[in-house]
Amino acid sequence: MYPKSFHPMAVERTRDYRGTAKGRTRTWCRPRYFLIDLGLSRQYDPANGPPLEIPLRGGDKSAPEHRDMETPCNPFPTDVYYLGNLVREDYLQVCTSVHSQIKAFLSHIHQKYHGFEFIEPLIVDMVQEDPKKRSTMHEVVNRFVEIKRGLSTWKLRSRMGRNNEIWPVTAWRAVSHWYRTVGYVISRKPALPEPK
């Protein structure tokens, strides 16, 4: 996190390009994330019941609803799919064949990063083929809060390492991670600071 910003073309440099940008970790400076796509936003009146609309094709075109572009569908389960698919593609291994999809859903999804087994059942529910079987966004948030509560402080402080790292890189990053983590523990910084 860069409280005084950074140069748009070189993140490691200050905004005026005269020095090194000073960064802080997410533990010291808790960010707030907003997942938006204002170009495809729609507003619905809850009094009219669940909306039905022809699917809008955004950046992620893998939603099962996009196979039939003529049938109106409820866009809210599609949003749940998009969020689940984002996590699946960026942190869990993408299943490319039907055989690997079946194997992944029956056992565990092969992870791109270590230690994401706790989120797999939630992601599987979010990317169900049938939109009616997907969790609602409210259910996703509640389940995520419960999952987070069930994780130990050490799990929350553990390093997110890629599965394909070579051992010298893993060793170097692990040492620097634990050095930084000891500083957080000594300064009584919570593993997941709550926003103010």
Image: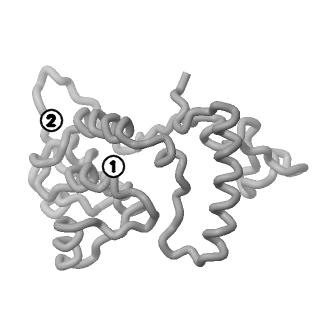
Residue 100 point in image, percent of width and height: 23, 76
**CA distance for labels 2 and 1:** 19 Å
Between 6 and 31, the residue placed more toward the observer is: 31
Residue that appears at 19% across and 73% down: 103
Between 58 and 34, the residue placed more toward the observer is: 34
Residue that appears at 58% across and 35% down: 30
Between 62 and 85, the residue placed more toward the observer is: 85
**The quarter of the displayed image where residue 189 is located:** top right
- Left or right: residue 89 compared with residue 71: right
User: Given the image, on which type of amino acid does mark 1 rest?
Assistant: Leu
Residue 151 point in image, percent of width and height: 40, 43
Q: Is mark 1 on a helix, strand or loop?
A: helix
Picture quarter with the C terminus = top right
Dot 2, crowdedness within 10 Å: few (<14), some or many (≥20)?
some
- First along the sequence among labels 2 and 1: 2
Residue 46 point in image, percent of width and height: 17, 24
- Left or right: residue 175 compared with residue 126: right
Which residue carries the number 1 mark? 83
Q: In this view, does 66 lie above or below 185?
A: below
Q: Nearer the viewer, mark 2 or mark 1?
A: 1
Dot 1, crowdedness within 10 Å: few (<14), some or many (≥20)?
some
Q: Is mark 2 on a helix, strand or loop?
A: loop
Cβ atoms at labels 2 and 1 below 8 Å apart:
no
Residue that appears at 72% across and 57% down: 9
**The quarter of the displayed image where residue 175 is located:** bottom right
Residue 83 seen in this snapshot: yes
Q: Which mark is residue 51?
A: 2
- Left or right: residue 108 compared with residue 98: right
